[in-house]
C-alpha cells in the first residue's frame, strides 16, 4: 500500500510554502521587536498625519477660493436639514392628532398625485 504523502504531488510545494511562511514570520517578529523599527514607524506615522493635516488645510483653502462648501459645512447643513425634517414630522403628527380629535370638522384631503398616462395595453384575458 502506498503512503498517502507520497501520492500527493503538491506535498513538497506545501512544505516549501510552510517553511517560507515560518521564516518570514520569524524575520518580521524579530524586526518589529527592535527599537529602530518602532522609532521609524513612529516617524512615518507622524509624517503621514502631518501630510493629512496639510492636505486638509489645502483643500479647505481651495474650496473656499472656489466658493464651494467644505465637508464640515455640508455636514452642518445636512444636520440642520435633518432637524427641520424631524420638526416637520412632529408638527405633522400633532396636526393629525388634532384632526382626529375633531371628527365633525372636515379636513381637506391632499389630492392624489397624478399618474402617468398608460401607454401599454394589458394582455388578452383569453390567452
Image (spheres, rainbow, N blue to C red):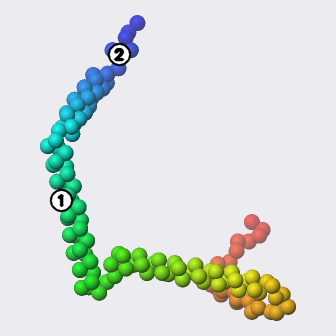
Taking 80 as reference, is 127 above or below it? above
At x 23%, y 61%, the residue is 49
53 to the left or right of 122 = left
Mark 1 lies on residue:
47
- As helix, strand or loop, the secondary structure at mark 2 comes to helix
Give the CA distance from mark 2 to mark 1: 51 Å
40 to the left or right of 64 = left
Residue 64 in view? yes
Crowding at label 2, few (<14), some or many (≥20) Cα neighbours within 10 Å? Answer: few
Please state the horizontal and vertical placement of residue 87, each as a whole percent of the image: 59, 82
Taking 111 as reference, is 9 above or below it? above
Taking 56 as reference, is 14 above or below it? above
45 to the left or right of 10 = left
- Front residue (pair 113, 93): 93
At x 33%, y 78%, the residue is 70
Please state the horizontal and vertical placement of residue 122, each as a whole percent of the image: 70, 74
At x 34%, y 82%, the residue is 69
Quadrant in which the N terminus appears = top left
Q: Upstream in the sequence, badge 2 or badge 1? A: 2
Of circles 2 and 1, the one toward us is 1
Please state the horizontal and vertical placement of residue 94, each as a whole percent of the image: 70, 83
Residue 5: assigned label:
2
Residue 80: assigned label:
none
At x 24%, y 85%, the residue is 65
Please state the horizontal and vertical placement of residue 54, each as a whole percent of the image: 20, 69
Crowding at label 1, few (<14), some or many (≥20) Cα neighbours within 10 Å? Answer: few
Number of labelled discs? 2
Residue 13 in view? no
Taking 7 as reference, is 101 above or below it? below
Amino acid at each position: 500500500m502506498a503512503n498517502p504523502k507520497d501520492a500527493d504531488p503538491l506535498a513538497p510545494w506545501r512544505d516549501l510554502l510552510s517553511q517560507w511562511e515560518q521564516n518570514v514570520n520569524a524575520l518580521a517578529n524579530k524586526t518589529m521587536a527592535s527599537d529602530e523599527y518602532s522609532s521609524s514607524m513612529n516617524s512615518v506615522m507622524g509624517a503621514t498625519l502631518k501630510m493629512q493635516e496639510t492636505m486638509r488645510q489645502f483643500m479647505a483653502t481651495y474650496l473656499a477660493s472656489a466658493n464651494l462648501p467644505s465637508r464640515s459645512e455640508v455636514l452642518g447643513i445636512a444636520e440642520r436639514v435633518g432637524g427641520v425634517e424631524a420638526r416637520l414630522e412632529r408638527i405633522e403628527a400633532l396636526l393629525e392628532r388634532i384632526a382626529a380629535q375633531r371628527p365633525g370638522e372636515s379636513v381637506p384631503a391632499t389630492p392624489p398625485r397624478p399618474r402617468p398616462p398608460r401607454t401599454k395595453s394589458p394582455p388578452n384575458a383569453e390567452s
